[in-house]
Amino acid sequence: MVMGKVQVGAAVICAATVCAAAALIVRHRMRCSSRWARAMAIVKELEEKCGTPIAKLKQVADAMTVEMHAGLASEGGSKLKMIISYVDNLPTGDEKGLFYALDLGGTNFRALRVQLGGKDGGIVNQEFTEVSIPPNLMVGSSDALFDYIAAALAKFVAEEGEDSELPPGRQRELGFTFSFPVMQTSIDSGTLIRWTKGFSIDDTVGQDVVAELAKAMGRHGIEMRVSALVNDTIGTLAGGRYFNKDVLVAVILGTGTNAAYVERAQAIPKWHGPLPKSGEMVINMEWGNFRSSHLPLTEYDHAMDTESLNPGEQIFEKITSGMYLGEIVRRVLCRMAEEVAFFGDTVPPKLKVPFILRTPEMSAMHHDTSSDLRVVGTKLKDILEISNTSLKTRKVVVELCNIVATRGARLAAAGILGILKKMGRDTPREGEIQKTVIAMDGGLYEHYTEFSKCMENTVNELVGEEVSKSIDIIHSNDGSGIGAALLAASHSQYLEVVDS
Ligand code: ADP
Ligand code: MG
């Protein structure tokens, strides 16, 4: 066969084009594969920096125990405030009557009304209303915030049914769950130390929280006495104890994190009051502010902390709680987009918006069991406006969620071990099956199953098989609200006249 000149020329050009195209593809692949390799290097680095081997967790637990001792020894002796709650009468189950509670802890607040039946009567009736806090009130004035709360409470009280009658001459009583650091001055008073969890209202710091609430209730014509000021951990401890006498510890994992436990009053050097009859005192640890050189912190954590409303504070909270986990994942993704074009040549603008990726969305992605990770794809598209992600990319996103959640869950477990050590309940006891029950609550614990499973497994791993049989971790649903009502009952001003 003879090829004409023209044909030969065309064939040569064609071949050259094919070669050039092939070279482009190869180069593109190489660029992609090196991009991918660099992206994987970022993931691997994160995984290493977030590592929580058992030996490290034990160091964290020991540091927690040491700080607990220091905080109990003297005021200001530790990053852990170890606040004396003045709660020395946890509910017994015999409480009786009508009580209210207010629960202000973060994104929402709730008002509750419970009718307690007395011995063996249990909770006869309970009702509640939930209202979200408008973001502008979280950084506004104290009066505005408390007025908003009092207005909702007034409305709720007005809906009280006829069955909720009070004995004559008796004022309604309320337990106030206020989940921010408060220096307690008695069971029913305390001053705010600082705001956390995105709240920032200067004129309240140093003020008596109960007085602020009482003023606002007065402005709204509510006749009610605040008989107990607690936080969510103490409320959860009380709520758990009402149903189970072995509850000794409460841990909250929600927007923020904190823990409370029952301490021997004699083991609190800074307590100068009379020894309570029960010999016990509930301690509000404020463990969110824990920090230690053993904590595995990354560049993302440091940057997030620096840019936060409370830099240098609440470091433990910033790596374990719901307000922050999604934000940490966003920061990693943002770096991957910026440095290795993980989502293509331009950085998706939404990815640069702080706190746009919330922990519930992170948890939805982490829990995605579909074979093509459909939920991850949808979330990336809906929240971050990143479309057409490959399965490979989605898998990386799930991996990031896993790394960040696992670190948080395992550190929370280490914190619990620290408390068990302080209580002397981390080692097997000869011939004694003494239960230690830990009451848990908070949206993160409740809804982020991968997180809570990991935390529970880690507690068991840390204490070992023998001791783990004596430790129960239970979900004390909604303990913080009911608990406050129960504490208003067990510390009621009418206790002497109550005929139970
Ligand atoms: P708060 O701590 O504000 O009193 P909650 O205990 O209800 O309130 O916790 C709410 C927090 O729990 C949210 O801010 C969020 O971080 C976390 N959360 C809620 N739902 C989920 C979810 N499905 N997955 C993971 N975290 C969640
Ligand atoms: Mg709460």
Image (cartoon, rainbow, N blue to C red):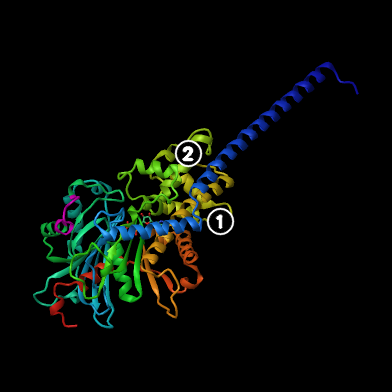
Q: Distance between the Cα atoms at labels 1 and 2?
A: 27 Å
Closer to us: 140 or 44: 44
x and y, in percent, of residue 434 in the image:
40, 77
Q: Name the amino acid, label 2.
A: Arg
- Asked where in the image residue 171 lies, by quadrant, the reply is bottom left
Asked whether, in this view, residue 54 is left or right of residue 203, the answer is: right
403 vs 233, left or right, is right
Q: Which residue does the image show at 53% across and 50% down from the upper left? A: 399
Q: Measured from the top left, where is residue 187 in percent x and y?
A: 19, 65
The residue positioned farthest toward the top in the image shown: 5
| Callout 1 amino acid | Ser
Query: Which of the two marks, 1 or 2, is nearer to us in this view?
Result: 2
Q: In which quarter of the image is the N terminus?
A: top right
Residue matched to label 2: 335
For the residue with label 1, is its CB less than 8 Å from the closest atom of ligand 1? no
| Residue holding disc 1 | 370
